[in-house]
Image (cartoon, rainbow, N blue to C red):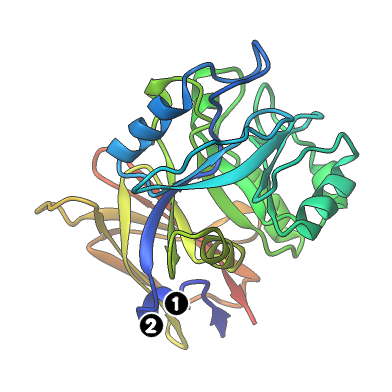
Amino acid sequence: MYKSAYEAFKNGNGSWFRANFHTHTGVCIEGKCGILPLDGVVDAYKQAGCNVLAISNHDRYIQRDKTYEGISLLDAVEYSASPHMLLIGVNEYHNVPHREAIETALAAGGFVILCHPNWQHKEYFPNNLIDSLDGYAGIEIFNAVVNRLPGSGLALDTWDHILSHGKRVWGFGNDDFHHYGDTCRVYNMIYAKSGSYPDIKEAVTGGCFYVSTGVALKEYAVDNDGIFVKAGYFRDSYINNFEYKFSGPGGKILFKTEGESAKFKPDGESYVRVEVTSEYGAKMYLQPAFAE
């Protein structure tokens, strides 16, 4: 039997919230962060349909002097003692080793995301360092800004490395926003009770979210007959054909098909994750189902 992270969605116990956890704006270190005003960035994300936004400047917490209607702003810091990490739900920075930074963030009630593992070159975030760390919620499997920088914004290889070594961590997709053109190029769709930080944290740490560049999750179920997935769009469309790819340990493709939906019965693999592609190349990356 496999365990799904989407039971709350299946049971209808919440709503979908669109979130970006990696945003640079406001008063920043020159040359290291975005320089756009916070009001303008928040407005851009609101217009793009974002519900949850973390302001995560390098090595410093940006104090906000007001609240914004229609969007939930989360405290965050990007830890930039290379390689980088996002510390979400925290309002202070400590220049300490990675392990201690994770422990400190968790003690403060936050959660941690390892950043852009293949930025600049493969294994910018080295696998051997990742293997030595525990307690982080997951990694950026899709960092949109790196797609216009050296290296690769995708890190499915790193994710499969971690999952294949028995760690249950989640895949995140973030803009790494610096300029207005970076807005909502990828996002995390989180199924939560509300957009408040405690509810977002509960959903995220439980894996009840997925990464998207334009494909929406309509149905997901796991039972004795296998894993069932049905995708769609966030808009009305008569197009309902998608490519479904089921992958397991080492990133091995276990099954691939096209259609309105897909179902696959695993054969004892330690985990199975699903990637869905639309007719125009938009993606959806689902969290793994793990063998129990």
Identify which residue, 32 or 272, lies in the foreground: 32
Local secondary structure at mark 2: helix
- Residue wearing tag 2: 11
Distance, label 1 to label 2, CA atoms, is 5 Å
Please state the horizontal and vertical placement of residue 219, each as a whole percent of the image: 32, 71
Please state the horizontal and vertical placement of residue 104, each as a whole percent of the image: 83, 52
* Quarter of the image where one finds residue 22: top right
Residue at 69% over, 28% down: 58
Q: Farthest residue to the front: give it.
A: 65
Residue at 24% over, 52% down: 234
Can residue 280 be spotted in the picture?
yes
Can residue 135 be spotted in the picture?
no
Identify which residue, 165 or 76, lies in the foreground: 76
Q: Farthest residue to the left: give it.
A: 238
Please state the horizontal and vertical placement of residue 255, each as a whole percent of the image: 44, 62
Q: Farthest residue to the bottom: give it.
A: 224
Q: Dot 2, crowdedness within 10 Å: few (<14), some or many (≥20)?
A: few
- Residue wearing tag 1: 8
Q: Do the residues labelled 1 and 2 touch (CB within 8 Å)?
A: yes
Residue 273 vs residue 137: left or right? left
Residue at 66% over, 59% down: 169
Residue at 73% over, 54% down: 136
Split into 4 quadrants, where in the image is the C terminus? bottom right
Please state the horizontal and vertical placement of residue 99, each as a whole percent of the image: 87, 48
Q: Which amino acid does label 2 sit on?
A: Asn
Local secondary structure at mark 1: helix
Split into 4 quadrants, where in the image is the N terminus? bottom right
Q: Dot 1, crowdedness within 10 Å: few (<14), some or many (≥20)?
A: some
* Quarter of the image where one finds residue 194: bottom left
Residue 217 vs residue 115: left or right? left
